[in-house]
Amino acid sequence: MDEIEINAWNDFARDLKKRVRWDGEKIEWALISALNVLPTLQEEERAELLKIGRVVAERSSKLAVTFLRIAPQAISVVDSSCRMTFLRWAAIFASQSRETLIDFLEKSPEILRAFAKNECAIFLHHGLHLAWQDWSLSFKYFLNLPRIRKEVPWEKFPLWFEQGLSLVRKSLPAAMAYYGLESKHSQ
């Protein structure tokens, strides 16, 4: 990371301190934690992460502080070949529901650690595709990834996923049940 990037992150933290009425030390600690992890990420990933952080800060300074504290570490756990897909998905959550974004980031290390690199890439790609259809549906899919991996045979996954997409246009509750493996059709 060069000085310009470090200054951009410091400016982000400074802006948060101006908006937040509680303990500025938490912001300082979150920034220090972030600056320890950020150099392990690619420049493009860091830029996208900062952009997402600013979107979160526009509506909630408190959630932006949480984002600053957890996002760099959450991203660092994701395989480097999958990070940009993960960040694009995170950006959709940031624009729609900052709370869901925080849940996504908090749960991602636990959920994604179990997947091999090629599996992770496929599941994240499909999740991003689903997020373009409906962000809340994609979060349901994300939360159920371990179960989907266990219950849907790998060779049948693409067909299974496509069948769920056909439900999105017909009935969002049916699609939610499908991607949550809560319907007979999904099983």
Image (spheres, helix red, strand yellow):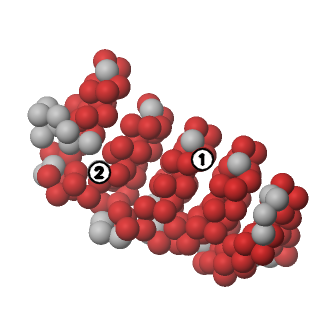
Total numbered badges shown on the rendered structure: 2
Q: Quadrant of the N terminus?
A: bottom right
Q: Position of residue 75 (x, y in %)?
A: 53, 66
- How packed mark 1 is, by other alpha carbons closer than 10 Å (few <14, some 14-19, many 20 or more), is many
Q: In which quarter of the image is the C terminus?
A: top left
In the displayed image of the protein, which residue is found farthest to the front? 22
Helix, strand or loop status at disc 2:
loop
Does 177 sit above or below residue 119?
A: above
Q: Mark 2 points at which residue?
A: 144
At a point 56% along the width and 48% down the height, the residue shown is 99
Question: What is the CA distance from the residue labelled 2 to the residue labelled 1?
Answer: 20 Å
Q: Where is residue 152 in the image (x, y as percent from the top left)?
A: 15, 49
Q: Which of 69 and 142 is in front in this view?
A: 69
Residue 181 found in image quarter? top left
Does 133 sit above or below residue 6?
A: above
Q: Name the residue under label 1.
A: 98
At a point 49% along the width and 55% down the height, the residue shown is 103
In the displayed image of the protein, which residue is found farthest to the bottom? 36
Does 58 sit above or below residue 184?
A: below
> Which of the two discs, 2 and 1, labels the residue nearer the N terminus?
1
